[in-house]
Image: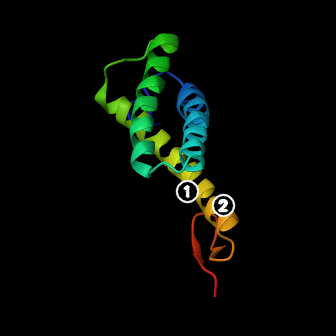
Amino acid sequence: MFQGILHEEASIWLFLLVTCVMGGWAAWMTGRAMASTWRSAAHLVAYLLILGAAVRFIHFALFEGTLLSLHYYLVDTIVVQIVGAIGYRMTRTAQMVDKYRWLYVADGPFFWKDRV
């Protein structure tokens, strides 16, 4: 159904395995690492652009995908950017609430607010 749009392989399971599971796990851990070391979101974006290229290389090396395809690179990179941003934001929220508990309280998994 999504072949040609999201993935080029014959099965969507390869896309889910490589891009969503493997790339998503690496993006989640990258987001957590960037937040844990108090780096900015710009650092995260830069690292995840590289990770998107690595995911594209895995598709190429293991499953005969196209290496230099802007379309599929963008698809892979968008997936890892979303997962990495979620990991970054959840970790940063936990940091702010834990380290500055006299100032902030959690307002959901992604936001914090001033303690009243």
Seen in the picture, residue 69 relative to 48 is either above or below; the reply is above
Residue 93 left/right relative to 64: right
The outermost residue toward the bottom is 116
Residue 10 spot, x, y in % from top left: 49, 21
The reply to whether callout 2 and callout 1 are in contact (CB within 8 Å) is: no
Quadrant of the drawing holding the C terminus: bottom right
Residue 5 left/right relative to 33: left
- Quadrant of the image occupied by residue 50: top left
Residue toward you, 62 or 115: 115
Residue 79 spot, x, y in % from top left: 47, 41
Q: Identify the residue shown where x is 54% and y is 45%.
A: 83
> Which labelled disc corresponds to residue 94?
2
Residue toward you, 14 or 91: 91
Q: Identify the residue shown where x is 46% and y is 24%.
A: 54
Q: Label 2 vs label 1: CA separation? A: 9 Å
> Which labelled disc corresponds to residue 89?
1
Other-residue count near label 2 (Cα within 10 Å), few / some / many at <14 / 14–19 / ≥20? some
The type of residue carrying mark 1 is Arg
- Total labels: the figure holds 2
Q: Earlier in the sequence, mark 2 or mark 1?
A: 1
Residue toward you, 2 or 76: 76
Render colour scheme: rainbow
Residue 109 spot, x, y in % from top left: 64, 64
The type of residue carrying mark 2 is Ala
Other-residue count near label 1 (Cα within 10 Å), few / some / many at <14 / 14–19 / ≥20? some
Seen in the picture, residue 38 relative to 77 is either above or below; the reply is below
Q: Secondary structure at mark 2?
A: helix
Of tags 2 and 1, the one toward the viewer is: 2
Residue 97 spot, x, y in % from top left: 66, 67
Q: Secondary structure at mark 1?
A: helix
